[in-house]
Amino acid sequence: MIKVGIVGGTGYTGVELLRLLAGHPEVEIEAITSRSEAGLAVDELYPNLRGHYPGLAFSEPDPVRLAACDAVFFATPHGVAHALAGELLERGTRVIDLSADFRLKDAEEWAQWYGQPHGAPGLLEAAVYGLPEVNRDAIRQARLIAVPGCYPTAVQLGLLPLLEQRLIDLDHVIADCKSGVTGAGRGAKVSSLLAEASESMKAYGASGHRHLPEIRQGLAQAAGQAVGLTFVPHLTPMIRGIHATLYARLTSEPGDLQALFEQRFADEPAVDVMPFGSHPETRSVKGTDICRLAVHRPGGGDTVVVLAVIDNLVKGASGQAIQNLNLMFGFDEMAGLQAPALMP
């Protein structure tokens, strides 16, 4: 049994960590922090957790108490983990950051996209990008994990087999992605109001989105060179979910694309390759840590289309963070993550 802390427990990813860890056989929550809700019982704010965490209340961030934990999750806005992660690492606590603070390896590029100087550039070299399907061995040894973003997770998993085998034109890849409104966080925003988001769909960030450099970084690692990516995200009127439709041009005869995908992900517990020509739905992964993929080759031509769906709060955030925790401490990789999807 290990002790875990959560910094920033009142947002969607924080409460999703609590929901999933309630069923984890090897984890005890030692501390959960929130400056705005300090002193409030967890189950008062989130009644769905009644009976799971008796006596657990939100508290002010206390470095000493957090350092007593074996691992600490940061479910915070960008920039917050910069200030505290280094201190915890020095005290021997492992850090799993769900924000974007350590995803990009270039501090100057991070500052450009996030509008402020990087607060802990000295930690970037030690940070391991927490995509288990790519970095499993490094994750096991890591002290600091940068949990991938939701869009980057879906896009990278969908394109990995094609990139690794160099089957596509690396200069022209398109990711057309849709997200539920929880992707914008729990803070009050006019654009997330029911009357604003319901019965409508819109693109945003078409000229440049913060996840773009993260996706490009991961695709370049898989391909061994820079990848020309056009990434357009959309807001859809659903609570949670990511749907990525990925387009690429084949540069050679790929053989059996279905077999390629099935073989690449045969040993991946969080990736499900559906039968050839399937159309995965976001509801089929709701509440789960699973990425469902399907591959198409329209008309047998030179275009390949990959469909990828995940729950943005689970495989796109908190569930993937727990996958990393499990790998770091030698637990079953899917411990606490094995419940099937919620349907309808």
Image: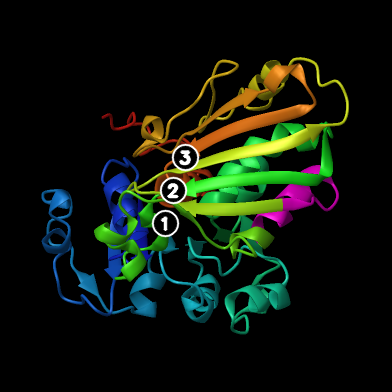
Q: Which residues are magenta?
A: 214-229
Q: Is residue 98 above or below residue 258?
A: below
Q: Amino acid at mark 3?
A: Ile
Q: Residue at x 67, y 24 (%)?
A: 261
Image position, residue 155 (x, y; %): 61, 44
The furthest residue to the front: 200
SS of the residue under disc 3: strand
Read off the residue under disc 3: 310
Crowding at dot 1, Cα within 10 Å, few <14 / some 14-19 / many 20+, comes out as many
Q: Amino acid at mark 1?
A: Gly
Q: Residue at x 87, y 31 (%)?
A: 251
Read off the residue under disc 2: 312
Q: Main secondary structure of the magenta part?
A: helix
> Does the residue at mark 2 contact the one at mark 3 (Cβ under 8 Å)?
yes
Instruction: Return the disc, 3 or 1, that comes first in the chain's sequence.
Output: 1
227 within the magenta span: yes
